[in-house]
Amino acid sequence: MTSPSTVTPQAPAAGQVPTIDPGSLFRFATAGSVDDGKSTLVGRLLHDAKAILADQLEAVGRTSAERGFGGGTGRLDLALLTDGLRAEREQGITIDVAYRYFATDRRSFILADCPGHVQYTKNTVTGASTADAVVLLVDARHGVVEQTRRHLAVVSLLRVPHVVIAVNKIDLVDYDQEVFDRVTADATDVATRLGIEDVHVVPVSALEGDNVVETSERTPWYTGRPLLRVLEELPTVDESGRGTARPFRLPVQYVIRPQGGTAPGLDADALRDYRGYAGQIASGTVAVGDEVVVLPAGRRTTVTGIDVAGTAPVPGAPLPGEQLTEAAAPLSVTLRLADDIDIARGDLVASADAELPEPTRDLVASVAWLGERPLQPRARVLVKHGAATVQAMVQDLEGRLDLEELVLRDAGTLELNDIGRVRLRLASPLPVDPYDRLRRTGAFLLVDPATGNTLGAGLVRDA
Amino acid sequence: MTAIPTAATHDHGPAEAGVHSSLDALEAESIHILREVVAEFDRPAMLFSGGKDSVVMLHLAAKAFWPGRIPFPVLHVDTGHNFPEVLDFRDRTVERLGIRLVVAGVQDYIDDGRLLERADGTRNPLQTLPLLDAIAANKFDAVFGGGRRDEDKARAKERILSLRDEFGQWDPRNQRPELWNLYNGRHTAGQHVRAFPISNWTELDIWRYIERENIELPPIYYAHERDVFRRDGMWMAVGEFSAPAPTEPVERRSVRYRTVGDMSCTGAVLSDAGTVADVVAEVAVSTLTERGATRADDRISEAAMEDRKKDGYF
Ligand SMILES: Nc1nc2c(ncn2[C@@H]2O[C@H](COP(=O)(O)OP(=O)(O)O)[C@@H](O)[C@H]2O)c(=O)[nH]1
Ligand SMILES: [Mg+2]
């Protein structure tokens, strides 16, 4: 089916919006240079997936008409659906990430529409850090440009599981297969050199709607699926690692000791000795009876309980407890342990039978530098990892990524938006995993001790 | 081993562990955020209006710290134009949970002249000053809000942890990057943080969760008969704060509320949805956003919410 060339307001008809729980949650972010059409594509996706409600569409229609979009043809500027700040609408650019939500009958999506300007790379890194996939736009007329390479480098650095390259504005190159093939070859070459494994390429016109939700007749040479179908079928990362050997990790966020006051309906006396270690399972599964190690101290103990609050039997009734026999990532739970050992926020509970993270005071890490002032060797920073924050010093800057050649080169500093590799010395040991193996326990923030601002994204490398 | 009162042993056997619905994922994320903020801040508080989003947020807090009590007070900015059913529900809820309620009253500010009643009579924009004063007076350093990114396009741009200066202002052009699930709440004296644990929930998620968890809500969220009149395309209740003009005929209709706020600018929708299951079905096929359908204050301009947030609003 050919997509309509003019977008007219269209509300979802009753029954078209899925009412069932579509199961898993899939997060994706947009990337690509400014004006490649990211916001328009997102708007088109939402529109054609019937995820825009009538009043939102009306507001977009009014603003589009006021601004003379499409020269009085009644066309909608779909980018207005996510460019939600006044400055963004006035300048016609995206400054910060906008989050939008939609569901098809296959799954629920959280999408992050990111800016394209180099100066807003920190916002693109924000959007990509939690993404299951990045949709990277390339303008068919311009092909791969510096920002394409930068964003692919970010995707590779953050180990975003999937990349979908949308070769956009295919209407402006007359739906020419040769152009598409050339851009595809260039982009996949960069991706391959960066070690990105799962790459899909789709020719689209965000403005006209070709291959966004429906397969376009204007690209008969393209035999793949339209963008939305690709996104519906990409596998999510299963942090629980069922079937794989993903080890159990739980950073302790908070120690629950209810002597001060118990939840309604509970007997304070019965809970006098209760101690629960609350946290979100970052990886793997845990079962009652499992042997675990509490790091960095290295004490061994056994899991005696996995507590969560259950569902009230009737509205307004006190919450009953539920004792799970087993729980998996990404659930937030409270663990009880056999031995009365000293455990505090910042400790990590890990399975004793798999490879353990080695508590270390020396980190080798890749860094996406997001600070206004350059990173200098010997700088003092704070490292925030899991629920722990420690002081650190930059011992050595091992190099900076050259975006042309995609190799690490010697550098004296890291400037805003650079990617590099550093060696950090920590004031106290942290139990880290290599980021490539476990994202959640291999990631950390670099924080400015003076202002409290976030300076960079850190990813632990195998030393 | 400690004795824990248990209703049922929920056995997530090996075949089930690791298979989670989108609601499970959202709940786990929200509980993680609640625990992070409570662990890292000295004096957190939660905004609680009795509206469905704040009720769900408070329920998540009860789960996050169970079997302990919710370890912070709740703060209500009372416009003086509340639905009596909602105030009653608010008081019963804090009583049941055994937590402290701090009320900041817009009416007090109008009575002593610190705030002036607006010509249109709506009070939502007047909440900012009492809110900021209550934050300063109680030395709250983190305030949980029930804002959801799907509500409005300015909210869609805000981080989960949002740094505010001493005037409570949000600077949308200068937000900290927020990476993975590592939340940086560092702030200097005078600054505070607004935390939005249910940022990623949609209106439909909220209702499906209310159904799944048996969460009690004020009765006005469900269909009931009420005297209403039509104004600006919305159904307004006849009441102390919203009287019909002579040209606005009063009708008795079956209505419910999709949001609860200032009675003078919150409209009802015609509905026969009397149960939570009915509401879930209705929301799933709704063709209007909840704010578009029911909030006069957000229809004023494309940037109404952004402007209020820049001034220190929720
Ligand atoms: N002809 C054509 N124009 C497009 C297409 N996609 C986007 N545009 C236009 O390109 C410009 C930049 O789009 P925008 O979505 O703001 O780009 P962003 O900076 O990547 O978010 C706008 O004028 C769009 O209307 C397309 O597929 N075809
Ligand atoms: Mg954009």
Image (spheres, coloured by chain):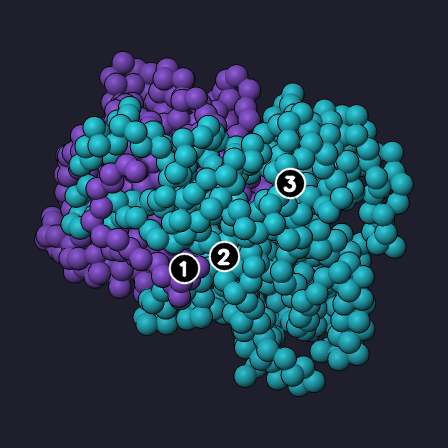
Describe the element under mark 1 as helix, strand or loop: loop
Give the quarter of the figure containing the N terminus of chain B: top left
Q: Check the rendered structure and report the hue given to chain A.
A: cyan
Give me the disc on residue A240: 2
Give the quarter of the figure containing the C terminus of chain B: top left
Question: Compared to A291, does B278 lie above or below?
Answer: below
Q: How busy is the neighbourhood of tag 1: few (under 14 within 10 Å), some, or many (20 plus)?
A: many
Describe the element under mark 3 as helix, strand or loop: loop
Q: Nearer the viewer, residue A425 or A12?
A: A425
Host chain of mark 3 = A
Q: Are marks 1 and 2 in contact (CB under 8 Å)?
A: yes
Amino acid marked by disc 2: Ser
Q: Nearer the viewer, residue B293 or B38?
A: B38
Give me the disc on residue A358: 3
Amino acid marked by disc 3: Glu
Image quadrant in which you'd find residue A370 = top right
User: Could you say where residue B240 lies in the image, as x and y percent from the top left?
Assistant: 14, 34
Q: How busy is the neighbourhood of tag 3: few (under 14 within 10 Å), some, or many (20 plus)?
A: some
Q: Check the rendered structure and report the hue given to chain B.
A: purple
Give me the disc on residue B17: 1
Mark 3 against mark 1, which lies toward the viewer?
A: 3
Decide if ligand 2 comes within 8 Å of the CB at mark 1.
no
Host chain of mark 2 = A
